[in-house]
Each structure stands twice: as C-alpha cells, then as structure tokens.
Amino acid sequence: MIGAEMVATAVDLGFKVIGVGGPLMQEKGLLPLWDYNDLPVSGMGDVVPKYFSLKNIFEVLSDAAESKKCLGIIAIDYPGFNMRLASLAKKWGKPMLYVAPPQVWAWKSKRASVFKQASNIRLAVFFDIEALAYKRMGCETIRLKHPITSWKFDCVEPKSDMLLLPGSRRASALRNLPSFITVAEKYRNVWAENNMGPIPDVVVVASREHLEVPLLVALEKLYDGRLPSWLKVVVAPKRLSDRLNFYSAYSAALTSFGTSTLEMACAGIPFAACVVPDFLTYAMGKILVKSEFLSLPNAIFGCGVTPEFIIRHKMNDRMAESIVDALFQQDIGTVDEIAIRLRKILDVGKTSSELVSEFLAQFLKR
C-alpha cells in the first residue's frame, strides 16, 4: 500500500517510475523491470537456492539506478537488495529515499554505518524504536505514518473460525505450514472437548496469488490427497483495509513474524506469532539478534503483549499445547485495548504521499 501510494504520487507529478514492485504498484503506474514474484525470500536457507536469480535482478536494478536518466531512487524494505543499492547511491551521490530501512534495533546494527555522512540518502521509519536506534548511530530519520491508521472498520459478522498465515515467502510458508496445521488441529480438539459450540474451520491465507497452489498441494500431501472439509486456502485481499476487515472477523490466528503480526494486533483478534526457521537463519539469529522480541507489537511496546514462539525442531504436542493455550488465554478486552493503543502509536508522522512529494520536489526545481 505504501509503495502504491508513492508510485501514484510520483506519476501524478509527471515522473516515470520503473523498478520491481507488486500488482498494486503496477496498477498505479510502476513499469516493472522484473517479475516481483521472483523476489521474496526469507532467511539464508531460502536465499542460497535463488542466488543467481536474485543476482540477475539486482544487476538489472543497479544498472537502471546508475543510468543518467534515473534522477533518484526510492527503496522500501528488502534490506538484502536495498542496502546494496544504498551503498551504490552513496558512492554515486544520487538522491535516495529509503522507507523502512533495516531493523538495526533488532540485529546487525553496523548496517547503519552506510547511512552515516550520506547526505543524499533520507531514511523514513514507522516506529519510534527505529528512530531511536538510528539516532544512537548518528543517523537522522523521518517519521512516517503507518497506513494501518487509515483503516476504516467495517462491521463484519464474527466467525469462530481460525486463520493460519504461514508467511509471504514461498519457502518459509511451506516450512511453517505443517507445524501450523498441527496447532490448528489441537485448537479444534480443545474447542470440541470443551463443548464451545460448532468446531471452527481453518483458513490458510496465501499472502499472494502465486502461493495459493503451492499451499494447496502441500496440504493435500499432509492429508494423503484428501483435504478435510474444514480446511481451505484463500488468497489475502490485496488492499490493507480489506485485509484488516477480513482478519477481524475471525476468532484466532497463528501467523509468521513480520508485518502480519502488526496487522493482527491492529485488527483486534487473539493471535500468536510462530516461525520454523531454517538452520542457517536460526544459527545466525542466535549470534546476531539482540532484540528480546521478534513480533512487531511486542518490540513496539517493549514487552510481551502477544505470545511468540520459535520452533527449532519438529512441532511436538507440548509446544502445540502451549501455543493453543496462549490463544485461548487472551482476553478480548485486552486485545481490543492493545489494538487501540497500537493504532494511536502508529498515527504519527508524514503520509507516504507527503514524504515522496517532498523527496521529488528537488527534481521539480531543476
């Protein structure tokens, strides 16, 4: 959503926008240089098999950025790519706006050194923890209002069903899925044992259309080709407001780490964050991660307001029971209070349209 708004603003101001971005950005006028679906990866174990493909994408992007026709660079998230682009932009002296730069508050704080003495690079962050971390490292930032704060709640019919969000990257989503299903089965069993009403169905959310079939195939494999009637896969709504309204109707959710934890918390439903990391990512994380929390709501509040779990080995009954207990123990009143407080915290700063307009103004004056 942030990217789409920025593209729309740039196009309205008369700029040609090229790069790599999702369907919403393309709808607003982004001219794609590569298929966006080739880009998402999560963890070192996912990067290695796609190394050459990712290398080709970066070369295409860096060549376009270095061109004299390119006035400036706007980067959003994706530190694996965008930090390398930032280093090149610093070398070239080319203006760059980096939205959601690396989470140096969590790990690899030395990455901030790229931005020191780089007056041509502006950093825009969503959270105070990011702004404070960069300030301690001598880097100024601009606070950006999170798009979640523009959500208009639609009154939706509540469901007792459960959501599973295994991840937005194919490899990590497929790695998380079996453990998520184990938790969902345990959740349904507890519901039945306590006579809580109709047993919930389970909805696996594909964050992008291209993940729907791989998730379905993986589920059918788990159930020997016979998908249970209580289990289905749906594609998440593209637009943030539609997505939040969709989530808010459900009674509970299990999600991977990332932006989805923020969306769940703001939607006001009980959830737990969980991940099954690949070996390389887990090993590096044990050495490099310095944050006590991985879930964004917990990191923002500085305490464990929502449960989070890291499954190092195969999911066992004890771990599944702990996750299910954490879901049932969450009080709806407390969940709603967290959602209200979180949306208020995020409602600070410039809009994405204001931010990109200010950045592009330097080129309009020429």
Image: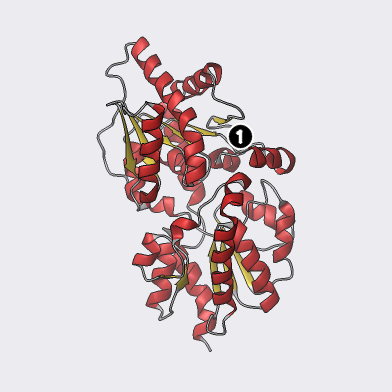
Q: Which residue is mark 1?
A: 303
Q: Is residue 52 left or right of residue 343?
A: right
Residue 93 falls in which quadrant of the image? bottom right
Residue 301 falls in which quadrant of the image? top right
Q: Residue at x 60, y 41 (%)?
A: 299
Q: Residue at x 69, y 65 (%)?
A: 115
Q: Residue at x 41, y 79 (%)?
A: 13
Q: Provide residue 359's location: percent of width, then percent of height.
A: 53, 74
Q: Provide residue 3's location: percent of width, then percent of height.
A: 45, 62
Residue 107 in view in this figure: yes
Quadrant containing the N terminus is bottom left
Q: Which of the pair 219/133 is nearer the observer?
A: 219
Residue 94 falls in which quadrant of the image? bottom right
Question: Badge 1, how many Cα within 10 Å: few under 14, some, many 20+?
Answer: few
Q: Provide residue 114's location: percent of width, then percent of height.
A: 71, 64
Q: Which of the pair 349/294 is nearer the observer?
A: 294
Q: Is residue 362 above or below residue 102?
A: below
